[in-house]
Image: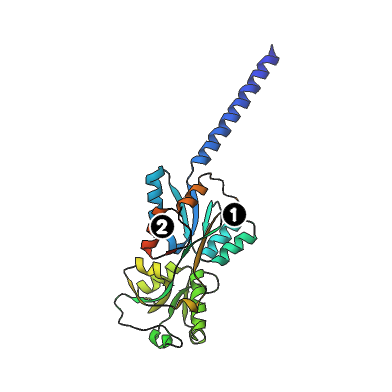
C-alpha cells in the first residue's frame, strides 16, 4: 500500500514543479522589454514607449547612460534585450564579443554636434578652422563628454582636431561622464561653452546653440540598434521593429534626429 502512495506523492511533486516552471516562464514573458540606450535618446524613447504602451498595454524598461558604460555592462552580463548606441564603435565592440544578434543590427538614427552657451550668455561665434574658441572661454573650461570613451566626446574631439583647435584646448576641457552631464554644466553656468548633440541642446531651455560643427569635421554620427544575444524577452524584436515605424519616426524627427532606418 505504501508504494502507490509514494508514487502519487512523486507525481504530485512533479506536477507542482511543472506548474511552478510554467508560472515562472509566464512571468518572464510578461516582464517589460529592457532597453539599454544612449543618454541622448532619453526623451524620444520615453515618448515612444508611451505610444507603445497605448498600442500594446505593455511597458518598456530603460537604462540610459553613456554608450561605453552600457556596452561594458552588457558585456558583464547586465540583462538588456536591446542596445541602442550613440556610435558604431560600441556596437562593434559588442558585436566582436558575440553579445549582439548581428542579423538584427541596423543603423537607426543620425545626429549633429553643436557648440552651446548658457541661455543668457552674450557670446556669438561662427565655427570655422582656427576660430577663437579658447579666447571665447575666458577663464572657463569647455564642457564635453569623456573624449576617450563617450561618443559625443569622441565626435567633439575629432571636430576640434579637424579645425586645428585641439592642442590649444586639450588642457581646458571639463570632461563629463556622458553628454547630458556635459550639457548640465553649461545649463547651470558652470562652464561657459560646451559641445553636445543638437538634439540635447533642443531639450534644455538653459542653453542656446551658437553654431553647428561642419559635418565634414568629424565622423558621421550614427546610432545603431540591435537585439542582444542574451536577451530573453520575446517582445524585444517587436519593439525594435516599432522603433522603425511611422509613430517612432515622427517622434525622432521632431526631436531633431535624422532617421536612417527604413520605415516599417
Q: Residue at x 54, y 63 (%)?
A: 69
- Residue 116 vertical placement versus 72 (above, below): below
Residue 83 point in image, percent of width and height:
53, 57
- Quadrant assignment for the N terminus: top right
Q: Is residue 184 shown left or right of residue 20?
A: left
Kindly report the distance in space between the C-alpha atoms of the residues bearing marks 1 and 2: 22 Å
Circle 1 SS class: helix
Q: Nearer the viewer, residue 227 or 145?
A: 227
Identify the mark nearer the N-term, 1 or 2: 1
Residue 170 visible somewhere in the drawing: no
Q: Farthest right residue? A: 3
Q: Is residue 71 shown left or right of residue 114?
A: right
Residue 141 point in image, percent of width and height:
43, 81
Which disc is residue 103 wearing? 1
Q: Residue at x 39, y 45 (%)?
A: 55
Q: Which residue position holds label 2?
A: 249
- Residue 235 vertical placement versus 94 (above, below): above
Circle 2 SS class: helix
Residue 243 quadrant: bottom left
Amino acid at each position: 500500500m505504501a508504494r502507490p502512495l509514494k508514487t502519487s506523492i512523486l507525481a504530485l511533486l512533479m506536477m507542482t514543479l511543472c506548474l511552478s516552471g510554467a508560472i515562472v516562464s509566464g512571468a518572464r514573458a510578461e516582464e517589460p522589454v529592457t532597453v539599454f540606450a544612449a543618454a541622448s535618446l532619453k526623451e524620444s524613447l520615453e515618448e515612444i514607449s508611451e505610444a507603445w504602451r497605448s498600442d500594446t498595454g505593455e511597458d518598456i524598461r530603460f537604462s540610459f547612460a553613456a554608450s561605453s558604460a552600457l556596452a561594458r555592462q552588457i558585456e558583464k552580463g547586465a540583462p538588456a534585450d536591446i542596445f541602442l548606441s550613440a556610435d558604431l564603435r560600441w556596437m562593434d565592440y559588442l558585436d566582436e564579443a558575440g553579445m549582439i544578434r548581428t542579423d538584427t543590427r541596423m543603423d537607426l538614427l543620425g545626429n549633429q554636434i553643436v557648440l552651446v552657451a548658457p541661455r543668457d550668455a552674450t557670446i556669438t561665434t561662427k565655427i570655422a578652422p582656427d576660430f577663437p574658441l579658447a579666447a571665447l572661454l575666458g577663464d572657463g573650461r569647455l564642457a564635453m563628454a569623456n573624449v576617450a570613451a563617450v561618443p559625443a566626446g569622441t565626435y567633439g574631439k575629432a571636430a576640434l582636431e579637424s579645425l586645428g583647435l585641439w592642442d590649444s584646448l586639450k588642457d581646458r576641457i571639463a570632461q563629463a561622464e556622458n553628454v547630458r552631464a556635459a550639457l548640465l554644466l553649461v545649463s547651470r553656468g558652470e562652464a561657459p561653452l560646451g559641445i553636445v548633440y543638437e538634439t540635447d541642446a533642443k531639450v534644455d531651455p538653459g542653453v542656446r546653440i551658437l553654431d553647428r560643427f561642419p559635418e565634414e569635421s568629424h565622423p558621421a554620427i550614427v546610432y545603431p540598434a540591435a537585439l542582444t544575444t542574451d536577451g530573453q524577452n520575446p517582445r524585444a524584436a517587436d519593439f525594435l521593429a516599432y522603433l522603425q515605424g511611422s509613430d517612432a519616426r515622427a517622434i525622432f524627427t521632431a526631436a531633431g534626429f535624422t532617421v536612417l532606418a527604413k520605415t516599417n
